[in-house]
Image: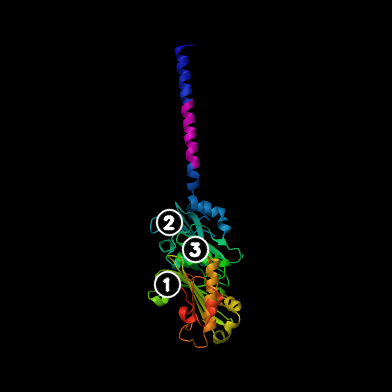
Amino acid sequence: MTTSTARLRRRTALFKGAAAVLAAALAVLTVQAAPAAAAKVCENHQVGGDILQKYRDIGGETSPLGCPTSDELTTPNGRGKYNTFDGGSIYWTATTGAHPVWGAVRDKWGALGWEGGKLGFPVGDELTNSDGQGRRQQFEGGTVYWHPTLSDGAHPVWGRIGEQWGVYGWENGPFGYPTTDEVWNAEINGFLQGFSTHRSLMWWSAGMGGDHNGVCTGECTGYKALSNSEWVTKTEVSRRVENGDIDIKVFPTDAGFDDADTDYDALWEQSFSSVPVPKGLTEEQRASLHKQLACHAHHAYNGGDGTTGPSWDLESWRPDVSWDYALSHVTFPLHLCNWE
């Protein structure tokens, strides 16, 4: 082999190697650039990257979003990007991904400060609830719920009230859909929120102070609702956040003061006809609460007798006792239905 031939082969090999490296590099660049490539949509505005991919995934121009009304913009807090469209927006951050927001949920989110508000950025798309009618969308700070007839608009649920609502089954539970936002209430030093079933209310309190407030002398959550039953007009349930202690206030009707001691099981059922029995009770706690309620009904009369008062207060930390001890007129002055 001549020297010139060897050099030619080495040059050819080097050329082929360089060409292969260049081709591989171009391939990598092509793969990386594709998702971030921008496109002019509806011959109007530039949409690119993950926002463009999400837009295409949900149907593009034929989706509820329609055509874009802006190029990609940076959110005021600098965390994310977004495009606006005829029917809503798509928001993106590196941690939450890209998600569309539209309709009543978007209106509520905007009213609460968009991504700069308590809800933060969307972390999921809008979903249909199991009833086939309601909608929900999750955000960093909570979830917004909407129903065409039950929710009276879209409302966020978050924090302690959201936790409590979830324990009882969310919108499929005994409280139904939220019908209001959280509203500050100075009397309870916390927030109230309305729900659709029985026009019930849930609350969170940082602590109401005073011994007369039971478990809510410290941080507590709770719920209440009016009742249309014969013997009970309203029931309130409170739970201390620190240790889970529960107290229940049952407000009897005039007929309840007079006649509820004729059927203690029926009284129990009526007490929880509009609100659920607290979750997590042991058998002993439930038995004690039942007997405390019977004790109040047995020893009270219309207008109260100075000991049981206008509400019948039941406390989960009271031990279980015998029926004789709970109902006896001899032992009643010793415990006043709040035995140790």
Q: Is residue 115 above or below residue 315?
A: above
Q: Which residue is mark 1?
A: 216
Q: Is residue 20 magenta?
A: yes
Q: Is residue 115 visible?
A: yes
Amino acid type, label 3: Thr
Residue assigned mark 2 = 73
- Where residue 62 appears, as percent x and y from the top left, is 58, 58
The span shown in magenta is: 16-31
Give neighbour class at mark 3: few <14, some 14-19, many 20+ (Cα, 10 Å): many
Write down the residue under mark 3: 143
Q: Would you say the residues marked 2 and 1 are in contact, meaning their CB atoms lie under 8 Å apart?
A: no
Q: Quadrant of residue 294?
A: bottom right
SS state under label 3: strand
Answer whether residue 8 is magenta in the image. no
| Dot 2 or dot 1, earlier in sequence | 2
Residue 183 in sight from this viewpoint: no
- Horizontal and vertical percent for residue 233? 54, 82
Q: CA distance from mark 2 to mark 1?
A: 47 Å
CB atoms of marks 3 and 2 within 8 Å: no
